[in-house]
Amino acid sequence: MNIFIARLRIPITRIAAGIGLFFLCSTTSYWDTKNSAVSFVLFLIGMFLVAIASLGRMWCSLYIAGYKDQKLITQGPYSLCRNPLYFFSMLGGIGVGFSTETLIFPILLTLLFSIYYPFVIKSEELRLERFFGADFIAYKKRVPAFLPRFSGFDEPEQYVVNPGTYRHHIFSALWFIWVVGILEALEGLKEIGLIGSLWTIY
């Protein structure tokens, strides 16, 4: 069951993105119309989380680019938790939610992540255990699954990186920033009247 759900990760993400885009195009933030200070704070929180997520995903990519399934990565962000890419993705998703200047979207995105991604993580870890056996089991005992623990941080003095693969990963690491750009473009279209709003949400 976990493997089946994990295989649907990309289609499910695309469907969720399409549904989210529809609601983003058809809604207006209550705070944007009633309290500009709250609206600004929500957007600021969103941008902060998106920045942390983008930098974090680039940091993770530095370690895994070109090494997927070839060796067990346990240093850098992977010494803080076993799934730092998913952790930073969660921060990015919540950040995008706050960038809509609402409270509903970050709450919904947090709930969706909490329900769905544990299955993805479980499937990924079963695969890694098949690949790396006892080494991964020992790693699981030493490093938490999701929430970072900084006391175990381990960083090498030097690390060999595949530049081409890393360059590809950088573009995927920055997609949260692109989404915020799309949100701002949609907001501009609403302000000039090219897109109408059906609902106002908090």
Image (cartoon, rainbow, N blue to C red):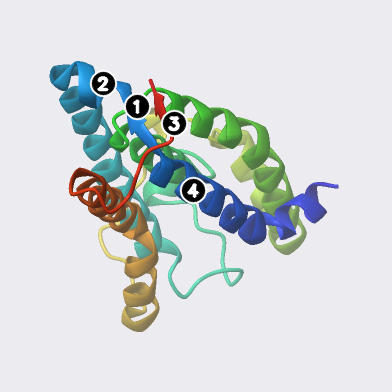
Verify CB contact (< 8 Å) between mark 1 and mark 2.
yes
Which element carries disc 3, helix, strand or loop?
helix
Earlier residue among tags 1 and 2:
2
Report the disc number at residue 60: none
Give 54 or 196, whichever is nearer the viewer.
196
132 in relation to 90, above or below: below
Q: Amino acid at mark 3?
A: Phe
**Labelled pair 3, 2 in contact (Cβ < 8 Å):** no
Question: Mark 1 and mark 3 in contact (Cβ < 8 Å)?
Answer: yes
Q: Which residue is mark 2?
A: 31
SS of the residue under disc 2: helix
- Tell me what residue is drawn at x 49 percent, y 51 percent: 74
Give the residue pinned by disc 1.
102
Q: Which mark is residue 105?
A: 3
Residue 132: quarter of image: bottom right
| Residues at circles 2 and 4 in contact by the CB criterion of under 8 Å | no
Mark 1 crowdedness (10 Å alpha carbons): few <14, some 14-19, many ≥20 = many
Q: In which quadrant of the rendered view does residue 164 lie?
A: bottom left
> In which quadrant of the rendered image does the C terminus lie?
top left
Depth order, front residue of 194/71: 194
Mark 4 is on which residue type?
A: Phe
Residue 75: percent from left, percent from top: 42, 51
Q: CA distance from mark 3 to mark 1?
A: 6 Å
